[in-house]
Image (cartoon, helix red, strand yellow):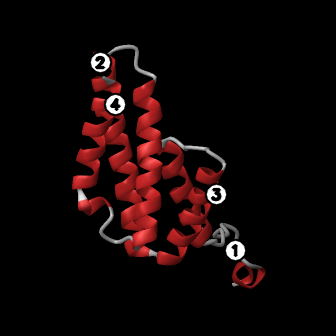
């Protein structure tokens, strides 16, 4: 029964092309592979069909959020996206299927590495000697 739930969830995911609209074909294929592996592992852990349905719905929402973030990043910064996919492919090759929260954290980390925070000089509250003499 869990296979039916997985098939239904995967079909819903594949129907939503907005999740991959900014990705190259290989990137979309990799992201789909990650999503299917992750969803399959989560649904397989269900004890009964009712649990499988609940887990499938919950995890599908999380996967959609992660895929949407990846797709948006691809539009904003393809270079950062390439680094992300290199890390994702490496993880999949090692049979590591990251949860959606880790996918989002990876994107955030790459965003932070791309744009360092501007350093501002603290304003001095003491007057300089030349201003004090006047």
Determine which residue is flagged by label 4. Answer: 3
Foreground disc of the pair 3, 4: 4
Compared to residue 63, the image places residue 32 above or below, namely below
For the residues marked 1 and 2, what is the alpha-carbon distance in whole angstroms? 73 Å
Q: Quadrant of the C terminus?
A: bottom right
Q: Earlier in the sequence, mark 2 or mark 3?
A: 2
Q: Earlier in the sequence, mark 4 or mark 2?
A: 4
In the displayed structure image, the side of residue 61 where residue 97 appears, left or right? right
Mark 1 and mark 4: span between their CA atoms?
Answer: 73 Å
Callout 1: 10 Å neighbours few (<14), some, many (20+)? Answer: few
Label 2: element kind: helix
Q: Where 133 sits versus 64, above or below?
A: below
At mark 1, the secondary structure is loop
Q: Position of residue 75 (x, y in %)?
A: 37, 74
Q: Is residue 116 visible?
A: no
Label of residue 26 in the image = none
Q: Which of disc 2 and disc 1 is earlier in sequence?
A: 2
Q: Residue at point 62% right, 52% down?
A: 91
Q: Element type at marker 3?
A: helix
- Report which residue position mark 2 lands on: 49
Q: Return the disc, 3 or 1, that comes first in the chain's sequence.
A: 3
Kindly report which numbered mark, 3 or 1, lies closer to the viewer in this rendering. 3
**Left or right placement of residue 132 versus residue 52 in this view:** right
Q: Do the residues bearing badges 2 and 3 touch, measured as CB atoms within 8 Å?
A: no
Residues at marks 3 and 1, CA–CA distance in whole angstroms: 56 Å
What residue do we see at 40% from left, 14% from top?
Answer: 47
114 and 53: which is toward the camera? 53
**Category of crowding for the residue at label 4, using alpha-carbon neighbours closer than 10 angstroms: few (below 14), some (14–19), many (at least 20):** few
């Amino acid at each position: 029964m869990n296979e039916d739930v997985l098939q239904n969830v995967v079909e819903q995911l594949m129907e939503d092309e907005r999740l991959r609209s900014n990705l190259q074909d290989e990137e979309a294929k990799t992201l789909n592979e990650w999503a299917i592996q992750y969803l399959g592992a989560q649904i397989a852990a269900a004890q009964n069909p009712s649990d499988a349905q609940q887990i499938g719905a919950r995890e599908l929402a999380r996967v959609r959020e992660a895929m949407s973030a990846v797709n948006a990043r691809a539009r904003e910064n393809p270079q950062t996206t390439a680094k992300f996919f290199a890390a994702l492919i490496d993880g999949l090759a090692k049979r590591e299927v990251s949860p959606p929260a880790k996918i989002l954290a990876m994107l955030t980390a790459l965003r932070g590495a791309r744009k360092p925070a501007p350093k501002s000089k603290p304003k001095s509250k003491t007057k300089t000697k030349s201003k004090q003499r006047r």
